[in-house]
Image (spheres, rainbow, N blue to C red):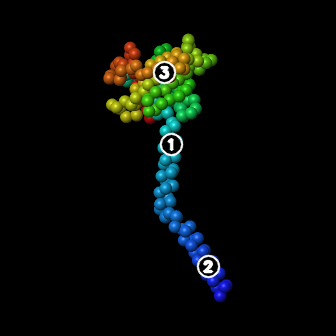
Amino acid sequence: MKRTLKTTALSLILLALVACSTEKQVSETDANNNLIMGLLAGQVSESSKDFTLNGVWNSFTGNATTLDTITTFSAKYGSKGLQLDDSTAFGGFSSCYIIIEFNNAEGSFITQNPENNGGCFAGDTNKGKYNKVFFFKNTAKDNSYWLCTVAFGKTYDAAKAQTDTSTRTNPGSSGCGASAFSRYDKKT
């Protein structure tokens, strides 16, 4: 009888353990949905670290239709990036800048002219200096942004503190200092 009692007690304990362990399990469908949600959340988190302007762009002055510059942006949050301009304008000068930081929510980024060769164009007197650019979506055209450099050749602190002094009312013809904004259309 003792043996039967022990066997019965042990069987009940094992049954309780199995029942308790399966109680918190989710169905395979729920598990797959949770996995997909986790993957999507991770992807969104990772893509928020990318600079909005990453990619290759055709650059124009204001509403102009004559292409004068092809610009490539590549930057990720927490590390330095690069802006390369391949230009036929201004005597055919191309330029390069180090992207120090960006703020997609504000629509701004800070670049630095490389210390040794400057902005990769002849006569750069701002080697190692910083610039601040503001950008916003062009609502009249898909895959297009307006950009305005509001600080050029500054110290890092001065560039960082620079507020947006542009006027966005008519970016195709004015508002970026004494001239139009630069328009960047995604290159296809």
Residue 96 at x, y = what percent? 55, 22
Callout 2 secondary element: helix
User: Do labels 3 and 1 touch, CB within 8 Å?
Assistant: no
Q: Which sits earlier in the primary sequence, circle 3 or circle 2? A: 2
Examine the image and state in which quarter residue 164 appears. top left
Q: Residue at x 53, y 32 (%)?
A: 74
Residue 45, above or below 142 = below
Q: Residue at x 43, y 21 (%)?
A: 163
Q: Is residue 173 left or right of residue 117?
A: left
Residue 47, above or below 91 = below
Question: Residue 9: which disc?
Answer: 2
Mark 3 vs mark 2: give the one in front. 2
Q: Is residue 89 left or right of residue 173?
A: right
Q: Label 2 sits on what residue type? A: Ala
- Of residue 23 and residue 177, the one placed in the foreground of this image is 23
Question: Residue 45: which disc?
Answer: 1
